Amino acid sequence: MPYALAIFDLDGTLADSFPWFLRTINDIADHFNFRRVADQDIESLRHASTREILSRLDVPLWKLPAIARHARRLKAEAASEIALFAGVETMLRTVADNGVQLALVTSDSEANAREKLGPSAALFSHFDCAASLFGKPAKFRRVIRRAGVEPGEVIAIGDEVRDIEAARAVGIACGAVCWGYAAPAALRALGPDHVFEQLDEIAGAVCPLP
């Protein structure tokens, strides 16, 4: 079905930040005294839920806000290293040109998000950024109210298990992309409404073209 509002995640969904994350995660681990990520751990972590990842790396929940702020600062410094996936600009414009409102809900700052999106930022009607690790449901609800649409007209598109969980928590459709942080098998296991293997599949699902 066509949607009136598409809520996008940024990192791993629109922006190719996973390589930066892998280069940076152990510096963050050392700074905040949690377990480093060994190369052989990466694939198993991609199959884990967010809470499982935190448990395996011994990350206390109380440290998450400080870790997030630190990561945003590092990401701002590395902005030139993080590009949008090929085809993102075309996809976003196609969706917007078909009358679908675009929203961005991300754990990154709005300043970082706008810099990464570049000219495509102008296509977004709503930004709700700096989401905590488990804070997306509240931001989804706020964006839906601002957009003036019903939950049944909304889809959230992301690349992690927690994106699917957040969409389910607020009663909206969810789409999972296969090119981001979580392993496709982990996403498929949750039965999202849409699974996107290629970026150019998104526009056809969000706003079916004639």
Image: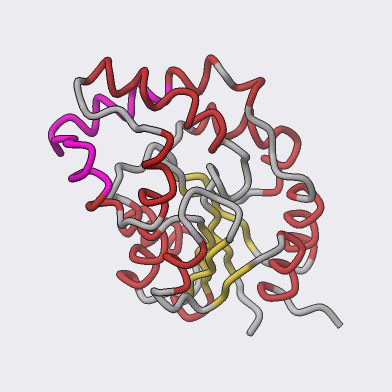
Secondary structure that dominates the magenta span: helix
Q: Is residue 79 above or below residue 124?
A: above
Drawn side of residue 183 relative to residue 165, left or right: right
Q: Is residue 54 magenta?
A: yes
Colour logic: secondary structure
Q: Residue 84 falls in which quadrant of the image?
A: top right
Q: Position of residue 110 (x, y in %)?
A: 50, 33
- Name the residue located 27 percent from the left edge and 47 percent from the top edge: 53
Q: Position of residue 208 (x, y in %)?
A: 75, 79
Q: Which residues are magenta?
A: 53-72
Q: Is residue 117 above or below residue 90?
A: above
Q: In this orientation, does residue 5 appear?
A: yes
- Total number of numbered labels? 0
Drawn side of residue 32 relative to residue 152, left or right: left
Q: Position of residue 169 (x, y in %)?
A: 30, 70
Q: Residue 5 falls in which quadrant of the image?
A: bottom right
Q: In this orientation, does residue 99 appear?
A: no
Q: Is residue 81 above or below residue 6?
A: above
Q: Position of residue 149 (x, y in %)?
A: 50, 72
- Name the residue located 37 percent from the left edge and 53 percent from the top edge: 139
- Name the residue located 75 percent from the left edge and 74 percent from the top edge: 204
Q: Residue 96 falls in which quadrant of the image?
A: bottom right
Seen from the viewer's position, the closer of residues 202 and 121 is: 202
Drawn side of residue 168 relative to residue 156, left or right: left
Drawn side of residue 190 relative to residue 133, left or right: right
- Name the residue located 69 percent from the left edge and 66 percent from the top edge: 202
Seen from the viewer's position, the closer of residues 117 and 82 is: 82
